[in-house]
Amino acid sequence: MNVFTFITVVVVASLAAGLVKAWMQHRHATPKADPKLDQELAELKARVAALERIVTDSEFQLKKDFEKL
C-alpha cells in the first residue's frame, strides 16, 4: 500500500465516521413540540371522549333498540 492509498483510506474513513456520527445525533434528537398540534390533539381527545360517552350511554342504546322496532 503506497502513501496515497493510505491517505485516501484515512480520508474516506474519517468522512464515513463523521456521517455516522451526524446520523446518530439526528436519530436521537427530540422533535420540537408544535403548540398548534398539541391543541388540536387535545381537542380531538375531548371530542372522542364525548362520543364515547354518548355511545356508551344506556339511553342511546335504548333509542337504537326502539328504532329497530
Image: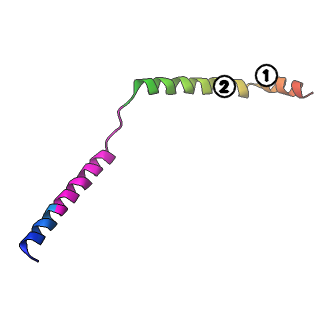
What's the magenta region? 12-32
Which of the two residues, 14 or 5, is positioned nearer the viewer here? 5
Most extreme residue toward the left is 3
Classed neighbour count for the residue bearing mark 1: other residues with Cα under 10 Å, few (<14), some (14–19), many (≥20): few
Going by the image, does 63 lie left or right of 32?
Answer: right
In the picture, residue 47 is in which quadrant?
top right
Most extreme residue toward the right is 69
Image spot of residue 20 (x, y percent) = 26, 55
Cα separation, mark 1 vs mark 2, equals 14 Å
Q: Nearer the viewer, mark 1 or mark 2?
A: 2
Going by the image, does 61 lie left or right of 37?
Answer: right
Is residue 53 shown above or below 2?
A: above
Q: Quick one: SS at disc 2?
A: helix
Identify the mark at residue 51; answer none if there is no mark. Answer: 2
Q: Main secondary structure of the magenta part?
A: helix
Q: How is the image coloured?
A: rainbow
In the image, what residue type sits under mark 1? Glu
Q: Tell me the residue that label 1 is attached to.
A: 59
Which of the two residues, 5 or 51, is positioned nearer the viewer here? 5
Is residue 64 shown above or below 12?
A: above
Residue sitting at 61 percent across and 26 percent down?
A: 49
Most extreme residue toward the bottom is 1
Image spot of residue 38 (x, y percent) = 45, 26
In the picture, residue 64 is in which quadrant?
top right
Tell me if residue 22 is in the magenta stretch: yes
Classify the position of the N terminus by image quarter: bottom left
Q: How many marks?
A: 2
